[in-house]
Amino acid sequence: MIEHRALSNYEAAAITAYGLTASDRVLQFASLSFDASVEEIFPTLTCGATLVLRNDRMVDSMRRFVRECGERAISVLNLPTAFWHEQVLALEREELTLPPSVRLVIIGGERALAQRVAQWHAHGGETAAHPPRLINTYGPTEATVVSTLCELRPEASQDPGTWTEPPIGRPLGNALVYILDGHLNPVPIGVPGELHIGGPCLARGYINRPELTSEQFIADPISGAPEARLYKTGDVARWRSDGNIEFIGRSDDQVKIRGFRVEPAEVEAILGQHAALRGTAVLARKDASGDERLVAYVVPHRPPAPAASELLSYLKERLPEYMLPSAFVVLEALPLTSSGKVDRRALPAPDRPSFRGEAAYMQPRTQTETLLAKIWEDILGLERVGVHDDFLELGGHSLLATRVISRVQAVFGVELPLISLFEEPTLSGLADRLEKVRQSHSTPSTAALKPGSTAS
């Protein structure tokens, strides 16, 4: 339930922040069922500017979109971040140029990729005499559309490596923004916490849902004012030393991978910096054993997509082992909702629970390799394992390694140290190590092999 005063507060702040005047022509891009439409409609009409409605054909192609923006003399674009990502790539790949009438581009709804920001400025700076301003916005509906914004200037994005995440900026208008820990205490600069919003921008609450309202809209412990409230966004963020806020991810998207707390969005942000990719999404899925595994969905600039081994090596240089995806799924495009956000529920499950390994499949050649392959298949939940497959690249880790070693002892009657699987991670390598140990112990070659064993 958004009050008129909250919308009025937003209108006044947006007109000032965006420099809207009666001479502007603002494209109505968002569906009326999406709160971003409020951002386009009311500030535009309030200041006497022109609201230009788009038709469905306008987004048939990026070339047509750019052409019609020019024909309609659009000066302000307010775009979903996912659509803007595609626009950046099209401008670069198809050598398109935004019409000179466009002076401002506002993005929001999803996290912006640092690499796309750098590409935007590189392309715009070379092709436009007066490149449009680029403003990154953030805000939940409960706080009336936009709560923070940040102008992403060219000088701050020359090196995308300096930004793990383009900032979402500082509070807009009369919004109050706090980043608090679990005890509702402010966190220091650089420390993640939950983002809370207060001020006249807040909604009354959720209609006919008093319990949810009291859960999400809490008393403000900072101001001390008796009726002051804060909205718990559920978003994790941190303050940067320059006074801007950096968005990290959703607290409810946080998952535990082998006991480690992981934000899939952090992995997604790093993967999104790979030069060969134009789209990425990372989420956690349960494998056949019920363990959480990270699955990365990637859209290449052009086929073929980078090999999974290449992407894995790229991430290994930037992330700890427990944050590495167990599977990579190549898509032609990320599925989007009607509001232009990535539709994570529509992302397909991997064909195999884990498929990092890409070595050409070669079936086991010996009885030892055959039995060892069956152990890996059972524990990793795979249909088949070849002699050149790597346990770690197939998604194996220390907890699963202990199960492999236990099963090896039960099936082969040989006790291998756990380190063996990490020193010899391929099936053939571990099989050779196993044979050497068996021979050194003078274990009869056939007595220890028990194909019917089911120890776990």
Image (cartoon, helix red, strand yellow):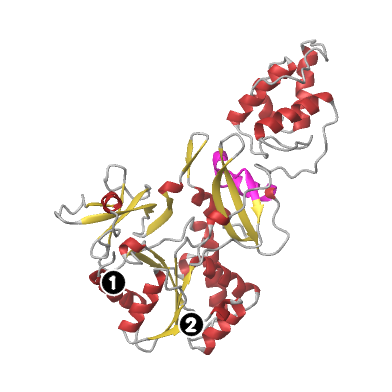
> Which label lies toward us, 2 or 1?
1
Was residue 320 drawn as part of the magenta stretch in this picture?
Answer: yes
Was residue 210 drawn as part of the magenta stretch in this picture?
Answer: no
Q: Is residue 372 visible?
A: yes
**47 w.r.t. 265: above or below:** below
Q: Amino acid at mark 2?
A: His
Image point (54%, 43%), residue name:
323
| Residue 144, percent from left and from top | 32, 66
Q: Amino acid at mark 1?
A: Leu
Image point (37%, 47%), residue name:
191
Dividing the image into 4 quarters, which one contains the C terminus? top right
Sequence-first tag of 2 and 1: 1
| Secondary structure at numbered mark 1 | helix
Q: Label for residue 130?
A: 2
Q: Residues within 10 Å of mark 2 (few under 14, many from 20)?
A: few
In the picture, residue 12 is in which quadrant?
bottom left
Q: Is residue 344 left or right of residue 7?
A: right
Q: Residues within 10 Å of mark 1 (few under 14, many from 20)?
A: many
Spot the residue most to the front.
208
Q: How many numbered circles does the render carry? A: 2
Magenta range is 309-328
**Residue located beneath label 1 in the image:** 7
In the picture, residue 134 is in which quadrant?
bottom left
